[in-house]
């Protein structure tokens, strides 16, 4: 055969192979359960179906305080009591007896020993003149920060952990986890010039401020190891990672984060992206949303759970700017958390498989190549698909969250069936959080039309912003 003919035959064969491969790819889309990846939930971190409430202190705090910690945990269906500043064994024991996983807060400002004193002078960070140091806004309150290299402060920190574990504490939240390195990083102070840091710096041939980051990690690791050995099982340590950030030192050391999400981050795109990164790193995240707008908190709550995170019950929530702490009402939020608890089987074991919203435009996106799309783009409606990784028989859950104001009367969604199950979608049901003040016969209605390979579903108005579409295989 002449060589040009051989070449021609070779080209023909290669092209056909490419065409064959290409058509195979198109015939077999990846199922959503194959896009979902098992993410590691660190030992002791919250599950997707957990309800986390923080009573920042034991309440009532005094005779004038009308709020009660254990009334709130019951009313909001809490399973965990997070970020509590206490070393009162009776309070910790009481929480444990009520089946709450109680988490004790640790900070660089823990008071001197013995437990119960109020001064903060022993084992503290020192500036170049030997004066005690702290964050600028804490100076007037004399809340001096402890030094991680000082054995006296190490003892203070450990005694708090030990006594909390003895009383039944489940895990620990560390506020201001960067210790002296935060003072250095923000150029608030040149620290720490205590004798322990000075000696350590000399040994390493560095300045005292240069050794802080590595000293802080050694300190946290030592405390976690000691706590886990003392308890006989791994003890989780979370930290305050503002807005869900893992890159700022030393957030990535911790098992999970509990952090304020500022109001400008209260949108579904950010929440989804932050939680996707959290899971990619094998971490978990609880957000505390800084807002007092009921409808906005409700939408954030739905979006956070839909993305595989937990939203702290909006009760005893820091508002910043000297505003009083926010205490959301039971009638506004309890039914959401009840909904999560009642449907835990649709949360635990499920992972992110796809996210989209009404505002995707189609010039470069082929709607036939994605599992779900909307018929109407002038809206603000979001869909979070969650599936059990590699499980083709388990129902697929689509969290629908309406971000329109006011909520839309109905929304049409189109599902490309071949992405969901091998033999298409069978039964479909819609479940929603129901506020008990509404009539009990309130029910969601779904109308669906089957055309080849597509399921078109008209979702009725989501009165409470959130609905779970449960899809079963054929
Ligand atoms: Zn020091």
Image: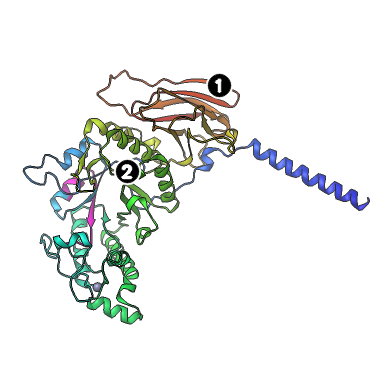
Look at the numbered disc 1 and give the secondary structure of its residue: strand
- The verdict on label 2 being within 8 Å of ligand 1 is no
Q: Which numbered disc flags the more N-terminal residue, 2 or 1?
A: 2
Q: Position of residue 94 (x, y in %)?
A: 16, 46
* Magenta span contains residue 109: yes
Write down the region rendered in magenta.
92-110
**Mark 1 residue's CB less than 8 Å from ligand 1:** no
Query: Number of marks in the image?
Result: 2
- Using the image as rendered, state which of residue 158 and residue 288 is in the foreground: 288
In terms of image quadrants, where is residue 315? Answer: top left
Report if residue 150 is visible in the image: yes
Q: Is mark 2 on a helix, strand or loop?
A: helix
Residue lying at 14% horizontally and 41% vertically, measured from the top left: 68
Mark 2 vs mark 1, foreground winner is 2
Vertical side of 245 occupied by 386: above or below: above
Q: Residue 277: percent from the left, percent from the top? A: 43, 50
Ligand 1's quadrant: bottom left
Report crowding for label 2: few under 14, some 14 to 19, many 20 or more residues within 10 A (C-alpha): some
According to the image, what is the colour scheme of the structure? rainbow
Name the one closer to the observer, 156 or 357: 357
The Cα atoms of the two marked residues, 2 and 1, are separated by 41 Å
Q: In this view, does 424 lie to the left or right of 286?
A: right
Seen as rendered, the residue at the extreme right is 2
Whether 460 is drawn above or below 39: the answer is above
Magenta run includes residue 253: no
- Residue 372: x %, y % from top left: 52, 32
Please name the residue shown 30% across and 75% down the image. 208
Q: Residue 61 carries which label?
A: none
Q: Mark 2 points at which residue?
A: 263
Asked if residue 321 lies left or right of residue 45, the reply is left
| Residue 162 higher or lower than 352, as above or below | below
The residue pinned by badge 1 equals 450
């Amino acid at each position: 055969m002449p060589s040009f003919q051989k070449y021609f035959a070779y080209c023909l064969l290669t092209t056909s192979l490419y065409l064959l491969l290409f058509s195979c790819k198109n015939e077999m889309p990846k199922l959503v359960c194959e896009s979902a990846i098992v993410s590691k939930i660190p030992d002791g971190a919250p599950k997707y179906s957990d309800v986390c409430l923080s009573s920042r202190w034991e309440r009532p705090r005094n005779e004038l305080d009308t709020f009660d910690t254990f009334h709130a945990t019951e009313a909001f269906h809490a399973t965990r009591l997070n970020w509590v500043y206490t070393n009162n064994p009776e309070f910790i024991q009481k929480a444990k007896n009520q089946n709450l996983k109680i988490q004790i807060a640790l900070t660089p400002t823990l008071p001197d020993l013995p437990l119960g004193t109020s001064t903060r002078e022993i084992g503290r960070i020192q500036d170049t003149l030997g004066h005690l140091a702290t964050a600028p806004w804490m100076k007037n309150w004399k809340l001096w920060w402890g030094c991680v290299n000082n054995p006296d402060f190490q003892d203070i920190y450990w005694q708090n952990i030990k006594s909390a574990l003895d009383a039944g504490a489940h895990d620990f939240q560390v506020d201001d986890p960067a210790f002296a390195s935060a003072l250095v990083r923000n150029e608030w102070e040149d620290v720490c010039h205590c004798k322990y840091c000075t000696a350590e710096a000399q040994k390493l041939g560095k300045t005292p401020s240069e050794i802080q980051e590595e000293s802080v990690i050694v300190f946290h690791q030592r405390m976690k190891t000691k706590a886990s050995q003392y308890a006989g099982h791994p003890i989780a340590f979370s930290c305050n990672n503002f807005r869900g950030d893992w890159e700022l030192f030393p957030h990535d050391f911790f098992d999970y984060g509990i952090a304020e999400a500022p109001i400008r981050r209260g949108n579904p795109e950010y929440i989804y992206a932050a939680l996707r990164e959290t899971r990619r790193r094998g971490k978990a995240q609880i957000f505390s949303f800084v807002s007092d707008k009921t409808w906005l908190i409700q939408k954030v709550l739905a979006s956070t759970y839909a993305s595989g995170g937990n939203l702290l019950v909006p009760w005893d929530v820091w508002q910043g700017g000297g505003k009083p702490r926010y205490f959301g009402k039971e009638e506004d939020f309890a039914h959401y958390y009840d909904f999560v608890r009642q449907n835990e089987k649709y949360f635990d074991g499920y992972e992110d498989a796809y996210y989209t919203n009404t505002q995707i435009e189609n010039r470069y996106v082929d709607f036939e190549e994605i599992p779900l799309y909307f018929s109407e783009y002038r809206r603000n409606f979001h869909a979070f698909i969650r599936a059990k990784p590699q499980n083709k028989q388990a129902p697929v859950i689509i969290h629908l969250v309406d971000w329109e104001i006011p909520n839309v009367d109905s929304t049409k969604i189109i599902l490309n069936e071949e992405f969901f199950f091998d033999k298409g979608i069978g039964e479909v049901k819609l479940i929603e959080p129901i506020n008990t003040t509404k009539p009990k016969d309130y029910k969601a209605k779904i109308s669906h039309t089957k055309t080849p390979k597509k399921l078109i579903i008209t979702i009725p108005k989501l009165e409470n912003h959130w609905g779970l579409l449960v899809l079963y295989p054929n």
